[in-house]
Every structure is written in C-alpha cells, then in structure tokens.
Image (spheres, rainbow, N blue to C red):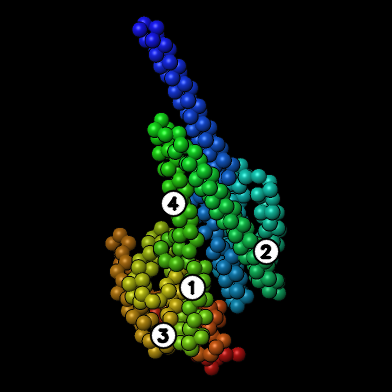
Amino acid sequence: MAASTANYALVFSRRRLLIGIGFLILSTVAVIAIKFYDSYARQQMDADYIAFSSEIVRAQHDGDSLRQSTLNLLDHPEALHQRQILQALWVINSRQVTIEQYLLRSSLTEEDLGHIMVEFSHLDTLLRKAQNIADNALEQPEQVPSLLDLTEDIDNSLAYIYSELHALMIRGATEQQHIMSVMTKIIMALGTLVLVVIFGLLVAIEKILGQQNELEHLSITDELTGLENRRAAMNRAKHILTLARRSDEPVSLAIIDIDHFKRINDQYGHPFGDKVLKQVALQLKQSARDSDILARIGGEEFCLLMPNTDSRGANELCERLLRGSRSMIITHREDTIPLTVSIGLTTTHHQDDYDFDTLYAQADEALYRAKAGGRDQVESYMPSTRG
C-alpha cells in the first residue's frame, strides 16, 4: 500500500513537473510572440499612424495653394500675391522637412524609403527654382509663366510622395494586422494560462483596426470642419456627373467663399478664424439638401454639388445659403462680427459640361464676378461667355 502511494506521489510529482514545464514553454511562446509583434510593429512605423496621416492629409492642399497663388500673381502682379507664393513655398518646405525627419527617425528600410527620398531630393530642386523666381517675380514678370509650370511639377511631386507614403502606411498596418491574426490563433491555443496575453493582443488588434478606419476617414474628410475634402468631392462628383450625362439630368455646382476672411484672421487670429470656418460649415450643411455634396476645397472656400438641379433651383438654394450666412451670429468677446459669403454658380448646359474641372472653372469665374461686384451675392456663369 505504501509502495503504491509512493508510486502515485511520484507520478503526481512528475505530472506537476510536466505541467510546470508545459506552462513555462507556453508562457515563453506567448512572450516571444508579443516581443515579435512589438519589434515588427516598430520596424514598420515607429510613430502613431493617425498623427502622421493627419500631416499628410493637411499637406495635400499645399500644391493647390501654391498654384492658386501663382495664378493670382500671373493675373495681378502685386506684392500681396508674391508674398502668398513665398508663404506657400515656405509651408511646403517646412512640411517636407518635418516628414523627412520623421522618416529618418523611423526604422523603415532603404528599400522602403529609397524612391521616396529620391523624390524628396527632386522636390528640393524644384522648390529652390521656384523660390528664386518668386523672389524676383515683380522685377522680372516674364519669369512668372515658368513659375506656373514649376508649380505643376511641384504639385505632381507632392502627389507622388504623399501617395507613396499613404500606401506605405496602409501596407504596414495591413501586414501588422495579418501578423496579429496569426499570433492570435497561436496564443488562443495556449489556453487559460495566457488569457491576459490574448486580451492584450485583442486590444492591439482593435487599435490597429480603429487606426485603419480613422486613416480612411481622414483621407476623405476635412480635418477642421468635418466636411468632405476636395479629393472626396471630386471622386463622388465624377460618379454623379457620369450618371447625369447618361440621363441628361442637370447638375449644378456652387463655389462659396467667405468674404473678407483674411481680415478676420488678421484681426482676431487664426484660432478664431478656424472657429468661423466651423460655424460656416455647419450653417451650410444645415441649409444644403441630403442629396447635395458639400465639401471644403481649401482655405475659406467651399463647394456644393447639386445633382438633378437646374439653374433656377440652384439659384434658389444659393440665395437661401446667402440668407443663412447673413443671419449667423458670430461673436468675439464683446464684438459681434458680421459675416457674408460670395457664391459663384454654374449649371450643366452641354455634354462637355459634365466634368468637375469644367464646372469648377465656370463657377470660379462666376465667383470672381461676385467678388468684383461687391460680394454678398450669387453670380451665375453665362454659357454665352465661352471663348
């Protein structure tokens, strides 16, 4: 009996030893898996995807700003427009330096970054050329057309760089998600002893998925106002205009610009200017219809695409937008600040009009006349002015 008990105790001790060894092995596998994930994640991207993607989204408007400033200088060679170009070049260069420093601090490989850094070098060259021309634009106006060509090259270079960075981040997040999925299956097999590890991994997976969703949201949303951004509006407009052309339905486009917005920024500061932009965006959203596409396309400029809307209906809606902007109550401390907007409006009249760039150019021409005519009004594009 004693011998049987001793044998049982010996077997039990051996089982406990085996369980302990098994637990140690399973725990070691879990720790290795976690360490591998942490190392892999740091190798792909050392900083938060959302913070970096926000910088990229903001930078996507820089090329448009530079091009518009150059066009303004070409039409009106004034010191103000020269300063706007120099400011736009400074912003692009400053943001480029920030992004380059971020990439150099990361653990991304030369294979991942080589072509991007080459393009950055090319962009540096373009910016220096543009800077030289812009510095002497008023003394040598004949150089301004070549500056306009340079802005096109700069915009293309920026588009390529940010497209590649966006793809790089998406790839990193996707690969992390795949690795996490495989690791989750392995760790779940460890059983009850590694439940804490499993919980941590699930939280990490949820964060990655959340970051991916936020990244997708940022790529189509204006960060300040929450409206769609220019890229998202153009993509949706292309689809709507294609369908409208087939059914020969009218589509109208309005460009809405806040009057004297620079004066508001200069007098009350940019943070208050951002507050005004948010309030205007909210007012426009409340006045627009559910079927309309409302987007902020840069600075204090918004666009409203109105499907299946003729010129009469579009004009009525724009007049409602004007009344809504006039009724806004905007205060700064004890000051009540009056606010108005100017609107350029166009409607498709020919098959060639079913193109966003065409409609935008027409509406922009009408907006210019609204500004020149005293602001706080709607001006419609007249097809008879086609040249």
Q: Are marks 4 and 2 in contact (CB under 8 Å)?
A: no
Amino acid on which disc 2 is placed: Ala
> For mark 2, what is the residue?
130
Question: Which of label 1 and label 2 is nearer to you?
Answer: 1
Near mark 4 (Cα within 10 A), the count class, few <14, some 14-19 or many ≥20, is: few
Residue at mark 4 to residue at mark 1: CA–CA distance: 24 Å
Query: Is 44 situated above or below 158?
Result: above
Mark on residue 353? none
Amino acid of disc 1: Arg
Q: CA distance from mark 4 to mark 3?
A: 38 Å
State the residue in front, 384 or 203.
Answer: 203
Above or below for 67 versus 21: below
Which quarter of the rendering shows the C terminus? bottom right
Residue extending farthest to the top is 2
Of the residues under marks 4 and 1, which one precedes in the sequence?
4
Q: Secondary structure at mark 1?
A: helix
Image position, residue 221 (x, y; %): 45, 63
Q: Residue furthest front?
A: 1
**Is residue 72 something that shows in the picture?**
yes
Task: Identify the residue position indicated by label 1 in the image.
Answer: 236
The residue to which callout 4 is attached is 210
Contact, CB < 8 Å: mark 4 with mark 3?
A: no
Residue density around tag 3, few if under 14, some if 14–19, many if 20 or more, within 10 Å: some
* Residue at horizontal 47 percent and vertical 48 percent from the top: 208
Quadrant assignment, res 134? bottom right
Distance in Å between CA atoms under marks 1 and 2 = 33 Å
Identity, as a three-letter code, of the amino acid under mark 4: Gly
Q: Amino acid at mark 3?
A: Thr
Q: Earlier in the sequence, mark 3 or mark 1?
A: 1
Task: From the viewer's perspective, tell me whether residue 122 is left or right of residue 338.
Answer: right
